Amino acid sequence: MKQLCILCLLLPLSAVAQLDGERFLKSCASMLATNRKAASMFYTNTKREKIRHDTSSATAQSYRSRAFTYLWQSNYEEAALWLEKTGDNYPKEHGIVGELYLSKLQDYPRALHHLDAYDALTPNFDDMISNNPVSYLRGLTYRSLGDHSKAIEQFCLGIDSLAIKHGAEWVNYKHFVSRAISYIATQQPEKALTDLDKATKNFSRSALVAYHRGRAFLQLNRTIEARTAFQDASFFFKALRAERTGDYQEDDFNPVYEDEIDEALANLKTQTR
Amino acid sequence: MTSTEPEIADCRLAQWYRLERLWLICLSFAFSLVHSFVQGQTPTREQLTGTWIGVHSEWDTDFFCPLPTYIQLDTDSVYHLGMVDGSATELTSTWAVNGDLVRLDTIHFAPHLIKLQDDLLSIGTNYPMVFCRFKDISIDSASTYRHLTGHVWQSDNLTIFLYDNGQVSLENPTSKQHTSHFWRLAKFGQSVFLVIRGNQYNRDSGYKPLWQINTVSPKQIQAVGWNGCAVAMETFQLVRNILPGESSRPSGFQTCDNCFQAMWHEAPLSRSPKRYEINRVFTKHYQPVNQAGQSGLIRIQFVVNCEGEQGLFDLHSFGEDYCPKTFDCQITDQLVAICRAHVAMDPSLRMPEKTDARPQDISVSLTFRLKNGRLIDILP
């Protein structure tokens, strides 16, 4: 009996084990390939990344990268320390620091402080931060603080100057959506619909635009059009999810979820009964 | 003053000693220079030829994952990559050394990425893979199995409980913390390896370090393997027989994966539909504790293993100035309780994107922003 046990132990255990072994060997071969070059950044190797930061020379990029690494690790104490250091030592970095406070830490007073400091560097120019003008990020910050009128004022700065100069088709459709959300919040659904129409022209398959059109129509008690808009939103959401990944969001600053759209449709059914 | 003959002799002797000491210092300096030079250099073809048993891959400076593979570099340029326990079909290709460059299969390694130090071969710097030179030791697997099974073996660094049913417990002799896995013996060449893999539930989900059995006697075994600090020969003394009815169970929370690092397995909650659900769960269940000053961030992290067990809860809190701060336990206890009852219990979190894949261990990290005891945001 024991000999049988020995035999069983010495033989490859099962088909599952075989499968696991194949997977393991494949991952080992991949890791060998990953190791063929020396990395300049280590990303998830947090300790190695820290050593790299500690030994690299002080530049705006290295300061920002360090702040970002700490943010990624949810080490908020160090992240805030390095965000502040980045802004203090490299004033041109105030913009990205402000954006990180806004998008990653949702710390709106600090975001505003840094965005203002960035904008003050060139007072007569609406400076860009990544792909957005500083006025747009300030608008989002005011919106998050609940001050929609100031938010609209800031959104208008970026949108109107670009639209007058080059035409509405050059405006990022997400900027129209953000302004529309503030119009809806301040009970101005007609203005919201105007913005959402312009947004649709710039991206016709947007679930985000359709969803907020539904909300604007609801405010106007145009329930049939609202239902159509929410149904469009649901359709575009599913289509985009199939095209991209499961955790895809059209706009991180204006997230929309499938359940949210379904609930809006369900509420509409309840109202019309 | 004139010197006597013995004084002159003493003086010469002292000079000779000084010279000899100086020569020895120079020699050791030169030796260390040559040694460091050799270490920095790409190993030669002759140095690389042979069989190398995987020790671990270093995923970070303090996080190693066992590597149960071998690399065999033959003199006729044939390259083999396989699993020591034979659980996969060996991959065969060719290898070469050309100046500073080493090629294994189709992978060309940049200069100095393959290093040799004594009997340890290190490949790469991103996730350095460490291999140990294999010395074939002829061992009878059947008698080794008879000696090992049903006994508890202890070295300075590790206690191993080898159960007859194929289960094994690994215990830290100091902390007494132990984990549960499965074991078997694997024949490799003439040698026998103790292969420990799997978790408390099954044989899948990775390996623990391999041990090559060197000698076996009724009261003691000697094996070479990673002891947590170095590749070393460990002597395991027989502690006792395993009692009838004694079974292998982990002493606390155990992940299914033997190579689990929270950051690598974080559930993607920031943009996924789950985020909407989580926002709703906390809005519904969190009762505000209206207290001035209860403002800032609370970060809760925990792990749910592949079978849905939850553990490794960790709570850190920060004030509005991002300095560490302690919140009222009415707030923190509530948040942890909601995490336990409503987030950790969600089985869909453990399901991988591929529909045919098995549930996996996941880590969850949630950060809440509070203002005077009210929950105002959950950070992305």
Image: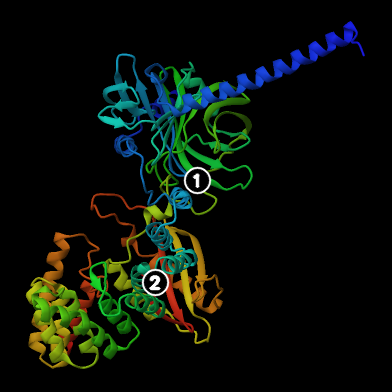
Q: Residue under mark 1: which chain is it in? A: B
Whether residue B17 is visible here, answered yes or no, is: yes
Residue that carries the numbered disc 1 in the rendered image: B62
Q: Residue furthest right?
A: B1
Which residue does the image show at 39% across and 71% down from the upper left?
Answer: A105
Does dot 1 land on a helix, a strand or a loop? loop
Does dot 2 land on a helix, a strand or a loop? loop
Residue that carries the numbered disc 2 in the rendered image: A105
Which residue does the image show at 76% across and 15% down from the upper left?
Answer: B15
Q: Residue furthest front?
A: B1
Residue type at numbered disc 2: Leu
| B252 up-or-down from B239: above or below | below
| A96 up-or-down from B50: above or below | below
Q: Quadrant of the N terminus of chain A?
A: top left
Image position, residue A181 (x, y; %): 22, 84
| Label drawn at residue B111 | none
Residue type at numbered disc 1: Asp
Residue B228 relative to residue B359: left or right: right
Q: Nearer the viewer, residue B331 or A119?
A: A119
| B286 up-or-down from B32: above or below | below
Whether residue B120 is visible here, answered yes or no, is: no
Q: Quadrant of the C terminus of chain A?
A: bottom left
Image position, residue A189 (x, y; %): 16, 90
